Amino acid sequence: MTVLTIEEIIDYAERWLSERDEIRNRKEEDPYKIELEEAKAKYGRQRMARRAQKFAVAAFVRQLAAGSKNDEQFQEQLDNIVKQERKINEETKTKEEGKNNEERKTEEERKTNAESLPVIPCDIGDPNEEELPVMFELKADAAFMNQFKNNSNEVQERFIKSLCQAFSIPSGEIRIKNIDCDKAIICILISKPHGTVVVKILIGGVEDAVARKEAVCKCFSDINANVDSIILGEFALEVEGRLMDPRWNKNYVSSSNDPTGQYWANSINQGGKPYFCPSGWKRYGIKVDTGGKEFDVKWGTWNMAYHGTRSEVATNILMSGLKVGTHGCHYDDGVRRVYVSPSIEYCAHQIYACPWEKTTKNGENLWYQLVFQCRVNPKSIASIKPETILGPDYKKEVIDPNFKNSELEWIILDRADQEFIADDIICYGMMMRTSKDHPKTLTPSKWWEHTDPACYSTST
């Protein structure tokens, strides 16, 4: 008979207890619950990324309008989107208040706050090479802002330390840049290269993004403050938005001899229809997939088309798709449809793509126009119809030399009684045209002078 020492007995007992606990924990694990939590986390990251993209587009258009006659209108649009997100957040919190379990309610409220907190990506630059500016907009509280600015009880040091922990970056890599008590704004700078991970966390680009964002919200609650929104980067004219897709930003020029951009003389076959070089325009890519191969698989055989729009509604289009209308030509009122065109010059008419003027930092006046570049499911095109802009006496005027006037309007009918069409039309590029003079003076726009006056009265 083998006699065990006290040490061996203790070791055996500890191993047995450890194995028992492991078996017990495995039995108590609910596979369905685990999958559910993983699905919730994934959905939370997707919602964060989608919201961030929506804010990126709004900020993009807002920046282009800064200092222009449309400045206040664009700022109001951005503010409305932020308010909408806050409203959703408040409604969700109200529902949570009806639950009996107080602990669960608090946890769910915190998650809702984190997921719904507006994050607005602006001109981020390269966080690997330069500091990342981050601006926190807080709920107005003059007493708190004064305490924070005066650094009462070392509140600034405590706040920065907790932020470093929330973002899992080394202590000392975040510093306060500015404190605006009147506007309730705190600006910080994040040292390179740590800004990269901060951006990913705040836009849902890492697996634990929701939890990390919760930790950021807690940094504010711990100092008795409430954050309303977060702005990444700074407002600037030239935007290469991280949630746009700069890989597909392109400048289209008018000659193959121009090295500053891309040009092709003949049409490209795109899904059985021609695609011509949109000379004079610059495309800002919109992120719609994870890579070029995925895009080709989904939409590679779809037709190229454009949709002119007023810039202040650009964000709504990116958020929901092209809005269905019930009025217009070619169909009876009440028939739900969307109009697109294979011609960017047709969509660029000012009744569709309303121009706006902006004074640059150098004092130069520039004009801007915005048109969406789309891919359209060929099966969804119900009919191809003539233009509806030229006056009765000018129907033979050439609008776009690449297309006949009789094929400039494509109609996509609503097939599911939806307010927006997103399944058959994908908007993947924001086309911008910049000119020193009003776009109506440009050579491709000469046909505008033959516009039917009635169009201007019905375009508002």
Image (tube, helix red, strand yellow):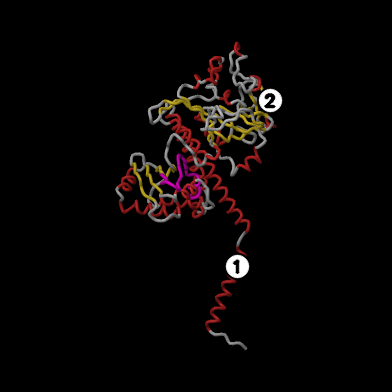
Tell me the kind of residue under disc 1: Arg
189 sits left or right of 455 in the view: left
Q: Quadrant of residue 351?
A: top right
Residue 265 part of the magenta-drawn span: no
Q: Where are the magenta residues, as a range? A: 109-133
Q: Quadrant of residue 70?
A: top left
Q: Quadrant of the N terminus?
A: bottom right
Residue sitting at 52 percent across and 53 percent down? 208
Q: Secondary structure at mark 2?
A: strand
Residue, far front: 257
Please tell me the numbered disc located at residue 271: none
Residue beneath disc 1: 24
Residue beneath disc 2: 383
CB contact under 8 Å: marks 1 and 2: no
Tell me the kind of residue under disc 2: Ser
Mark 1 burial class by Cα count in 10 Å: few <14, some 14-19, many 20+: few
Alpha-carbon span between mark 1 and mark 2: 65 Å
223 sits left or right of 7 in the view: left
